[in-house]
Amino acid sequence: MMLLTRTGYDWILPGVCGLGLHFRLDGFRLIYAGIAVFMWVISGIFSREYMAHYQKRGRYYRFFWATFAATAGVFLSADLYTTFIFFEIMSFTSYVWVAFDEKRESLKAAETYLAVAVIGGLVMLMGLFLLYDQFGTLEMDALGPMAGDVLSRGAQAQRARLYAAGGLLLFGFGAKAGCFPLHIWLPKAHPAAPAPASALLSGILTKAGVFGIIFVSCILFTGDRTWGLLIAGLGFATMFIGALLALFSTNLKRTLACSSVSQIGFILTGISMAVLLPQTGEHNSLAVRGAFLHMLSHSLIKLVLFLCAGVVYMNLHELEFNEIRGFGRKKPALLFCFLMGALGIGGVPFWNGYISKTLIHEGIVEYIAAIGGSFLWRCGEWLFLLSGGMTVAYMLKLFVLLFIDRHPARQPEFDSMSASYMRPATRFVLILAALPLPILGMLPHQAMDRLAALGSGFFGLKEYGRAVSYLSFENLKGGFISISIGLLLYFGIVRVFMTKQEETGTSYVNLWPSWLDLEQLLYRPVLEIAFPAIFGAVSGVLDKYIVSVSVTIFLSVSSVACRAMDHLADGVIVLARRTTHSQLPEPDTHREGNWLARFFGSLADGTVFLWDKLTGRMELYGKRRSAVSRLSNKEIRIKYIGSLVEESFSFGLMLFCIGLCATLGYLLWVLLA
């Protein structure tokens, strides 16, 4: 069934999975459906060369397109029930990507990915239960006004329940988005998955989580200061920690994965500003546009960067810095594509990342001005600029590593690959994916602003707001501060402490402590040791002191009840035997029967008398018992047995009626109670 509504085109499939499925196509969903199609087509064409040497390509492509369908279902969903169904399908189909090569490291990374996905999905489901129980619907359009009424006029218990549901949903969506502290799967899953799959995991599957966070934050909790501060805290923490992990990483795809964590933090910061700034007029317009455009920019940028990493891996089957340094020399197509992605994500003017980061920064500045200045928020602004500088530093590190450094032993081999390191079709789609990055950045008003105007309605933005002068001194100043911080970090920290000069050239050193792994340090000990120990001890105490005592009491009470019921049944039987069903007396076997017995008995006696007389045995006749007596006794005995059968049947029927009446009485008591 297709309906045309005020907000766009709706598709409703009633009865599917109970509540039915509800899809919508509006501005935001149209853009992200288009982004999904573009990314899957580019990655699919790239996969033809990348996956050529794998034996199980059929399995990869089946789950490749199944994940596309599930991801499209998430972005087109118009109610949270539909979102949840496709969200879970997407999690399970993309799991196959992570575990695809079936190596030990890949299976362990897939285990982490699946654990986070399953736990996040179950927690999200609990949030949906609470939300549905409170409002009676999961339709996105209906939930916003009802949640607003609860926040503004509802009782404290209602608000607490809404916060609980929102927190559970945030946990589930944040786990997929890679939000701190649930980011642990990204640095492990991305290096394990094939590069085209990593591009999709980072570029768009994480945005499925952001999609849910946008709805919860900007629709359910719009204008709520407590919720806005929570998202801001998560955003700043995710932004900084992801950049720090990327700066210390010595693996190409791990660096890009940690970079994705950081960029999700930038998006969350923009979402928090959209919640905190006044909802009237155009006050939160900059933050909304910045969050949406950085979502879009990150999807396109990570598509390019992960495919560039895929080119490196499919030639060298290595990702460690010291093994791949110098590979990009004399490869202009790879250099161009990687440079476009690096400049875009670094926030360099005239590239798309600069536009979105500028808008988010302007949102922070606007909020600081709205609250009259705050030292804590000034520190937050500088943390934003520092994280942007760290982004510049680690992308500069990757660029120098690939295109300027030289490999001490294999550089001639790398240089000889200049014409054969990727097929023409692969080169074409890679360049095609890289071209939008500078085009969007050089045409901000014609391209970026129009996309923002089309997609910002999903954030609840009522007025688009003023146009921004992206190349003004104030806006350029923020970008140049981050770039300057990045250069200082690279030349003052990376080149000094994270590299080592040897006779054969520059080698990279991993300074990150191996024990400082949140999964190994906290989550696995809690889930595998602490929880089993605590719950095992609690269960033991319950079993020993409560369950066993309860069972003993229950058995004692039930034993007494059974004996009482047994005596009651015996009493009923005795009473019946003495009254309505008293035992019949034994019949007198010598009493004569009716005329039929006498007739046949006399006939039999006469026949015997004639036979004895004819045969001369009259002396025996007087000794025989009369046939009349025998037949009469048989008749009386048969009637007696029939009476017993009739009596037993009547007694059983009476007991059945008593039991039936007792059962019906109990059921009537339960229903009335």
Image (tube, grey):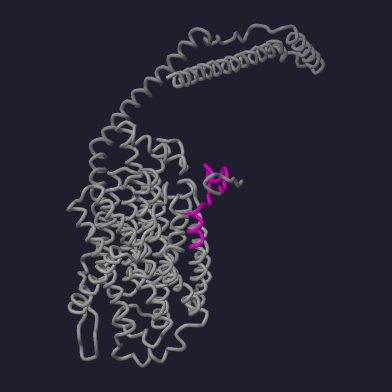
- Which quadrant would residue 383 be assigned to in this image? bottom left
User: Does the magenta portion include 26?
Assistant: yes
Name which residue lies at 38% across and 56% down.
Answer: 117
The residue at 37%/84% (across/down) is 328
Residue 165's x, y, as percent?
35, 42
What range is drawn magenta here?
9-35
Q: Is residue 218 left or right of residue 250?
A: right
Please state which of residues 320 and 501 is positioned toward the viewer in this rendering: 501
The answer to which of 491 and 302 lies nearer the viewer is 491
Q: Residue 641: x, y in percent? A: 61, 16
**Residue at screen point 41% across, 66% down:** 98
Any part of residue 532 in sight: no
User: Is residue 636 something that shows in the picture?
Assistant: yes
Which residue is nearer to you in this view: 420 or 125? 420
Does residue 39 show up magenta in the picture? no
Q: Position of residue 526 (x, y in %)?
A: 25, 54
- Direction from residue 527 to residue 570 in the image, left or right: right
Placement of the C terminus among the 4 image quadrants: top left
- In the depicted structure, whether residue 497 falls above or below residue 631: below
Q: Residue at x 33, y 43 (%)?
A: 223
Residue 89 locus on image (x, y percent) = 47, 55
Quadrant hosting residue 255: bottom left
